[in-house]
């Protein structure tokens, strides 16, 4: 039987929303069951978790035929998503961070400078604040602050990515932008996971053409949890890093090698020396001042502090590669000691700085006040990473200076002062024993306590409208005073401590007019720059 006949029996191409290839079969999922025709014996119909699917033997149907169907599904998905590209009105919506117009945003993807502009993508589920089949949204920028929406670049349209075009990175080449991503497939009632590593290429930096999987099989020793390709060039070859889970359910790094970006050989699993968590997600790697680093998201990390209950974490390690590109991990640090910093990616700026952007959100949280306005999560602000005399420093990206408006001097004390906005940069030195409260209105506020007795800087958001997630983070500090540069943007706070020694990121949901600032335990001089809105990538 032909694929065309299966499509006809399914009620035509516009009734098909998914194509799958479970072992030796071709399966199509339909939108409207009533449009299915009477089926011959060699076509079976099943309901998989409420989705009606028709299957037949794959026979001699080749990848190219499947690709043509995938392309039509992609066009339908892009058309449907258009209606979700208009941003909803929302008091929580940031003025200069990237937020989804509607639906759920998660990881930043494909962050790279290519042919005269910066490219940035993000994981998106357009239709609800839920983690379902992911799309890639494409943005570009010339200044890393103002972003233009370009397209819905990838959709979960094909047999190799039908349940999500998952995270990955981009590589800039003379002949185009190469985007590597994970194809996520779920089969049957048990939603059995199948994973492929895929490539899509854009010749013009706008239109992306899927090339399909470049890695179809699992390497030995891992589960289907292997994803988020990072591709880079070292020692005369291409190297792909993947976050992976071993069959013993431990997080590891899988390494592949290639000479042409399309044919990949498995090299091995690495990371025994730091064994951490049950899965590693979203690897990234880069060099800073001659030192290579490795960034990833280990999952299932336990913390001795009873307030710190979230196992999805962020880490950066010093990494070395031998001449065969075998990685070894050395000492490591937490990148962000706040609540909401995950799956970061970095890019090199034209002038050679390393900038990082993360997902301001966490995998298991899907209910926050912004869901009432049909959107959830955002990307973090851009930070620069430096390696200075054996110390890691993270500082606000210098590009953000352009958002500053005329500064105001504030003498902070126990009397509530009105910042008159919720988008600002604030600098001050906090002394041990003092408490800074921001976004204050009545009994609503977020606080930073320099707790002398415990020797911690405590970020506390229990007096906010947060619906899910931890509310207290405690960061041990030994410095004599605590130099703070804080960035607020409507529903978030990013706190740089002691010239970028530490950073704490938090989503903070408070009433629209919760703009008060209070300092308890003394008087402190502060400088506040209101920050103007960046150009909105999406038009209302
Ligand atoms: C991290 C992550 C990635 C995956 C993506 C799916 O947040 O789970 O590992 O590729 O999200 O959206």
Image: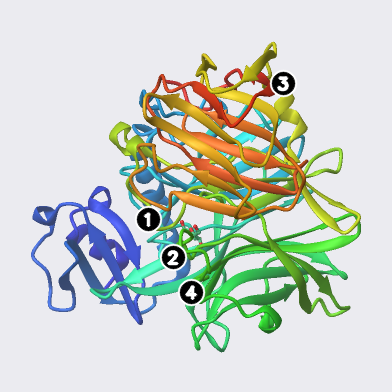
Q: Cβ of disc 2 within 8 Å of ligand 1?
A: yes
Which mark sits nearer the N-terminus, 1 or 4? 1
Judged by depth in the image, the label closer to the viewer, 2 or 3, is 3
Q: Secondary structure at mark 2?
A: strand
Q: In the shown orientation, is residue 531 left or right of residue 442? A: right
Residue at left offset 75%, top offset 44%: 500
The image position of residue 69, as x and y in percent, is 38, 57
Residue at mark 4 to residue at mark 3: CA–CA distance? 41 Å
Residue at mark 2 to residue at mark 1: CA–CA distance? 8 Å
Judged by depth in the image, the label closer to the viewer, 3 or 1, is 3
Identify residue for label 3. 402
The image position of residue 376, as x and y in percent, is 39, 41
Identify residue for label 4. 225
Q: In the shown orientation, is residue 457 left or right of residue 319? A: left
Task: Look at the picture and state if 152 lies above or below 93.
Answer: below
Quadrant containing the C terminus in the rendered view: top left
Asked if the residue at tag 1 contacts the one at tag 2, i.e. Cβ–Cβ closer than 8 Å, the answer is yes
Instruction: Report the colour scheme.
Output: rainbow
Viewer-side residue, 523 vs 422: 523
Task: Look at the picture and state if 319 lies above or below 337.
Answer: below
Asked if the residue at tag 3 contacts the one at tag 4, i.e. Cβ–Cβ closer than 8 Å, the answer is no
């Amino acid at each position: 039987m032909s694929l065309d006949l299966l499509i006809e029996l399914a009620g035509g191409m516009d009734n098909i929303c998914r194509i799958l290839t479970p072992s030796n079969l071709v399966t199509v999922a339909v939108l409207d069951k009533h449009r299915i025709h009477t089926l011959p014996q060699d076509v079976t119909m099943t309901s998989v978790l409420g989705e009606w699917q028709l299957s037949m033997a794959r026979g001699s149907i080749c990848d190219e035929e499947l690709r043509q169907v995938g392309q039509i599904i992609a066009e339908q998905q892009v058309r449907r998503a258009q209606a979700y590209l208009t941003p909803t009105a929302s008091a929580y919506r940031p003025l200069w961070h990237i937020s989804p117009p509607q639906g759920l945003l998660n990881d930043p993807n494909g962050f790279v400078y290519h042919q005269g502009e910066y490219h940035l993508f993000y994981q998106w589920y357009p239709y609800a604040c839920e983690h379902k089949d992911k799309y890639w949204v494409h943005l570009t920028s010339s200044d890393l602050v103002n972003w233009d929406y370009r397209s819905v670049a990838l959709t979960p349209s094909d047999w190799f990515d039908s349940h999500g075009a998952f995270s990955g990175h981009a590589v800039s080449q003379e002949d185009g932008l190469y985007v590597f991503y994970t194809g996520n497939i779920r089969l049957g009632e048990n939603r059995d996971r199948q994973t492929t590593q895929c490539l899509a290429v854009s010749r013009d930096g706008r239109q992306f053409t899927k090339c399909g999987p470049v890695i179809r099989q699992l390497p030995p020793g891992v589960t289907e949890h292997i994803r988020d390709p990072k591709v880079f060039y070292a020692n005369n070859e291409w190297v792909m890093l993947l976050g992976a889970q071993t069959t013993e359910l431990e997080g590891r790094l899988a390494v592949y090698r290639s000479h042409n970006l399309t044919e990949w050989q498995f090299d091995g699993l690495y990371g025994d020396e730091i064994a951490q968590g049950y899965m590693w997600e979203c690897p990234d790697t880069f060099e800073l001042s001659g030192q290579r680093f490795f960034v990833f998201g280990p999952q299932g990390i336990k913390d001795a502090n009873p307030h710190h209950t979230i196992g999805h974490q962020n880490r950066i390690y010093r990494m070395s590669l031998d001449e065969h590109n075998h990685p070894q991990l050395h000492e490591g640090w937490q990148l962000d000691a706040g609540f909401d910093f995950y799956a970061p990616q970095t890019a090199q700026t034209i002038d050679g700085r390393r900038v990082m952007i993360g997902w301001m959100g966490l995998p298991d949280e899907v209910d926050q006040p912004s869901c009432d306005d049909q959107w959830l999560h955002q990307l973090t602000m851009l930070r620069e990473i430096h390696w200075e005399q054996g110390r890691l420093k993270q500082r606000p990206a210098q590009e953000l200076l352009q958002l500053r408006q005329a500064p105001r001097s504030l003498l902070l004390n126990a009397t509530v002062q009105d910042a008159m906005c919720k988008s600002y940069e604030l600098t001050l030195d906090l002394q041990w024993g003092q408490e800074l409260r921001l976004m204050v209105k009545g009994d609503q506020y977020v606080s930073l306590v320099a707790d002398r007795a415990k020797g911690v800087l405590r970020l506390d958001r229990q007096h906010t409208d947060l619906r899910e997630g931890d509310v207290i983070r405690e960061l041990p500090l030994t410095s004599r005073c605590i130099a703070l540069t804080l960035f607020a943007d409507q529903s978030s706070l990013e706190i740089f401590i002691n010239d970028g020694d530490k950073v704490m990121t938090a989503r903070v949901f408070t009433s629209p007019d919760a703009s008060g600032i209070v300092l308890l335990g003394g008087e402190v001089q502060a400088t506040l720059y209101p920050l103007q809105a960046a150009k909105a990538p999406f038009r209302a």
